[in-house]
Image (tube, rainbow, N blue to C red):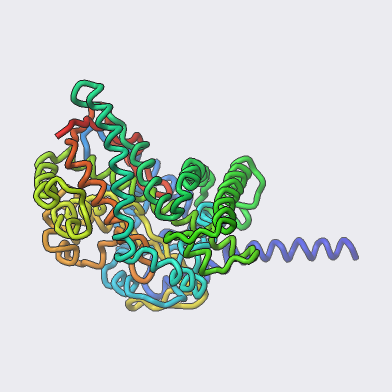
Amino acid sequence: MLSFLIALAICCLVFYVYHNLWLQPEKIRKRLLMQGINGPKPSFFYGNLLEMKRIDSSKKVKNEDKCISHEFKLHPSLNFWKNEYGPTFMFLKGNRITVYVSAPEILKEITLCTSLAFGRSTAWIKQRTCLLGDSVATLNGQAWAHHRKIIAPEFFMEKVKGMMDLMVDSTLSLLRSWEVRVETAGGFADIKVDEDLRNLTADVISRACFGSSYLKGKDLFSKIKALQTALVMQATWINLPGYRYIPNKKNREVWRMDREIQQSIMKVINERKVAGNIENDLLSTLIDANDLNGSKASEKFVAESCKTTYFAGHESSSITLKWVLLLLALNPEWQARVRAEITAVCRQHIPEANALRQMKLLTMVIQETMRLYSITPLILRETLQEDIKFGDIWFPGGVELMIPVAALHHDPDIWGPDAGEFNPERFANGASKACKFPYLYMPFGFGPRVCLGLNFAIAELKVILSLMLGKFSFTLSPNYRHSVVYGIVSEPEFGVDLIVRKV
């Protein structure tokens, strides 16, 4: 009897694995094939991962350019399959079916979809749970809607205006340190700006999130950066059930750093509760909204919301600042035009909200930068549990949709023959007039899940850049090596080296 039960258990396990890794994906794949969505034929367990690796290796993609090009280079296999199967095709990552969507008519409906049955990719969420936790960035359905309703008011424009003074204070502190370096070096300094910009945006978001506790918030910065790096090393394309729970060396390191970050945030939260301080910051809003009375669920929500805001609030801004300064260093005529505009608008005064609205050229430069160097090159969404129709296609529940943001931002059919060039003039009449299909410009995402911090990010970029360009000019350092690395975000692989001079 024991032998029979063991044999039965093994058979059930084999059937379960075979069903999940082959029968179920194949059933969905056939439904998509019947609707005209084609793609490479998958193999058992790996799907199309081995073919993807082979194509990417054969193309010998090298991100480092001797002459600086703004060409987008990520997964040549996707471009290869697009040429072979059309703008909408499917492939398998392990047992997960992903549909690559670049057809404008389908994307238009996707960007307009407000259904709670359409949300973040569950595979994407699992890979980033340690970094972002159960927060507005990773939740779906009613839980996501509830969390967004709490946090969104913190980033309304009226609230952002009240944060401009702290943006200015943080930036002026950095500029004073650059002034000393320039004067000490004899009129100009060769500066790798990456660390300075990361510290600057971390300082700004720390003040915005933690108020008077911002110095303790800043201590989280290095820990979150280290966790991000560890997650990139941990990431796997294969959708292996339970992989992130295996106690291997990489996973244990991720778990350790996650615990340290949670403990640091909870220490700040508990100190705020004991002190009874009433501050006009995100931390107070989250504490009040959840009425922390010892509920572990509520405490976890506050901690992970702070962690998510902290990561998203400083990482994307610092990287965008690097790209803007690089592009202005490469295009001195635009740098001169933007500086002249800032001088005319601010007239030697500190920029304020009304002045930011008048900086049209600076806005155009920021928009063009976010087009050429999208922080998030791919957006992954999923039909959660139920079928959803986009265009003439019914996408079965559980299918992942890949929206190739960076590829769309570089498409000559959308942006014209100069799509690979830096040309802020295309945004002279706003983003809605910049390209053939305005809804395909999505630097902050799209639809109801558009980035909550959009207003904050744009205001921060304008404040920092206007102060920097008012004091310094930037040219490219001979030490600069142009290479884009695609991880959780897209950033300069070797950093940005600039020659900095006082104006």
Q: Is residue 43 above or below residue 249?
A: below
Measured as percent of width and height from the top left, residue 301 is found at 55, 63
The residue lying at 46 percent from left, 53 percent from top is 210
Between 330 and 354, the residue placed more toward the observer is 354
Measured as percent of width and height from the top left, residue 126 is found at 54, 58
Residue 176 is at least partly visible in this image: yes
Q: How many marks?
A: 0
Q: Is residue 113 above or below residue 436?
A: below
Quadrant of the image occupied by residue 118: bottom left
Q: Is residue 472 above or below residue 389?
A: above
Residue 46 is at least partly visible in this image: no
- Quarter of the rendering occupied by the C terminus: top left
Between 116 and 150, the residue placed more toward the observer is 150
- Quarter of the rendering occupied by the N terminus: bottom right
The residue lying at 53 percent from left, 64 percent from top is 287
Residue at the right extreme, as displayed:
1
Quadrant of the image occupied by residue 339: top left
Left/right placement of residue 279 relative to residue 291 reads left
Measured as percent of width and height from the top left, residue 23 is found at 58, 67
Measured as percent of width and height from the top left, residue 99 is found at 40, 64
The residue lying at 48 percent from left, 51 percent from top is 49
Between 187 and 239, the residue placed more toward the observer is 187
